[in-house]
Image (tube, grey):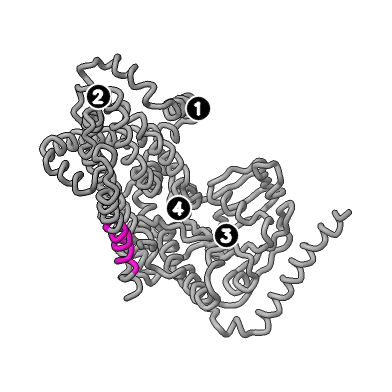
Amino acid sequence: MSDADRVKVPRPVARFDDVTRRFDGGLVALDRVSLSVHEGEFVSVVGPSGCGKSTLLSLLAGLTAPDAGRVWRRDARPGEVGMVFQEATLMPWADVRANVMLPLTLLGEPRGACARRADEALARVGLDGFAHARPFELSGGMRMRAAIARALVTRPRLLLLDEPFGALDEMTREAMNDQLLDLWASSGLTCVFVTHSLYEAVYLSTRVVLMSPRPGRIQAEHRVDWPYPRGEAFRADPSFTHLRSALSVRLREDAVTPEGGAGP
Amino acid sequence: MNGASGRAYLRWLAPLALAVAVVVLWEVLVHVFAVPVYRLPAPSAIALALYDGHSTLLESAWHTLSLALIAFVLAVAGGILLAIAFTRSRLVEAALYPYAVVLQVTPVVAIAPLILIWVGLDNAPLAVVILAWVVAFFPVLSNMTLGLRAVDPGLRALFRLYGAGAWQELRLLRLPASLPYLLSAMKVSAGLSLVGVVVAEFVAGAGTSPGLAWRILEAGNRLQTPRMFAALVLLAAIGVALFIALSCLERRVLSRWHESRR
């Protein structure tokens, strides 16, 4: 009985308690945000630009510290969290393998093991055979896959993605979405995915977090109860369209209200 | 493809054709107007002077080139090291940068006699190297400082995410990222070190330094204008050779990480 309970209640991997963070100029980027992320979840954070969703991610990564409140992460050692940025941010002077093994190099792993694990990570994202290619020789989608391989190379438990597919065309983007879901489903990863696309958020996530701007606050959370693997059946289902437009209405309401209220 | 290779030819052919045309016109005009040789020698006279004096002139050219190369290498090394110190410590930068600027804006001719006194008159080559270094090192310092700072913020975040130390960040991120800045500074700096050597030789050389600059002064005093031109031709050739060598190096290194190879 108690065992069954433990299985049913997912353990938290990260938690925000009343976290406030200001920009350098003093403007409030995040205002008393509380949020829990549980093991195995795929959480999307959606909101207009300026709602602090990227700030939330960099706090979660430990790259910045909160001005008030507490950020807690279960796996706090370097390499236990992976991050994918808006751009692929590959080192242009190094080949794909050297780029992917960078995290291991920085963590001081032995060289031979680094190369082997980099090749494994490349195979997982379908880039085997491109180990010696230079970043400029790859397409945008392939560069992003290399960036994902780099984030996965340390076998992290938590993967943070900051609008990773924003610059890609729609076809590539949908293919990348499915690939990411495959990786997530096959590895027991927990993902936190920042995007401004509700379409992407609803399609990918177990839970969608809506944020509102100035100051950045969490406005609503929605569970998405559609079984994985999702694929075209979900994209074509009325419930997908319905949830997407309902969330879209909420986002728009919130984008309008504060400006209307604060107007002259 | 035809158009591209045609344009490549044009880049060599156009200046070459212009040079031939100018030389021919020059030769003809000097003869037609009977210009005295001490005022403007014909290209043929310059070629003859080059041939006649080739053993002395080439020796001088080698002397000038080797001093310029030494100054250049020291300027690049010093510029890189100081730039690293600048990026590691704002205090070091705040303290030293104004003096680097002072050194840069003070005309090298003006400090030459001073340097000569310090190193001793019998040490003219050393004085020349120091003066050329003063001229050549600033572009490396300023460009390299810029390059070390102009690192993709995403990559810096990535390095921090994996707990990279300052040394790792310098070696694996900042140094490679600043390579394009360094290479373009090196092209400028190589030319400046040659300029520095010639200027320093004019001031400090006075008979003790057998470089090309001294040959020009010497020939000028004797009104051997063709020989002056011959030395000038060699100086220009050295400058062009340095520029081409560094451009090739730049192209080779950067072709590995840029699409803009051409």
- Identify the image quadrant of residue A9: bottom right
Q: Is residue B106 above or below residue B45?
A: above
Q: Please name the predominant secondary structure of the magenta segment in the image.
A: helix
| In this rendering, the label closer to the viewer, 1 or 2 | 2
In the picture, the disc for residue A145 is: none
Q: Residues within 10 Å of mark 3 (few under 14, many from 20)?
A: some
* Range drawn in magenta: B7-20
Residue sitting nearer the eye, A34 or A121? A121
In the picture, the disc for residue B205 is: 2
Q: Residues within 10 Å of mark 2 (few under 14, many from 20)?
A: many
Q: Give the residue type at disc 3.
A: His
| In this rendering, the label closer to the viewer, 2 or 3 | 2
Quarter of the figure with the N terminus of chain B: bottom left
Q: Where does label 1 land, which residue?
A: B94
Q: CA distance from mark 2 to mark 3?
A: 77 Å
To which chain does the residue with label 3 belong? A
Element under disc 1 = helix
| In this rendering, the label closer to the viewer, 1 or 3 | 1
Residue at image coords 60%, 69%: A206
Residue sitting nearer the eye, B89 or B78? B78
Q: Where does label 4 land, which residue?
A: A80
Q: Where does label 3 land, which residue?
A: A38
Q: Give the residue type at disc 2.
A: Gly
Q: Is residue A52 left or right of residue A143?
A: right
Residue B116 image position (x, y, % from top left): 29, 18
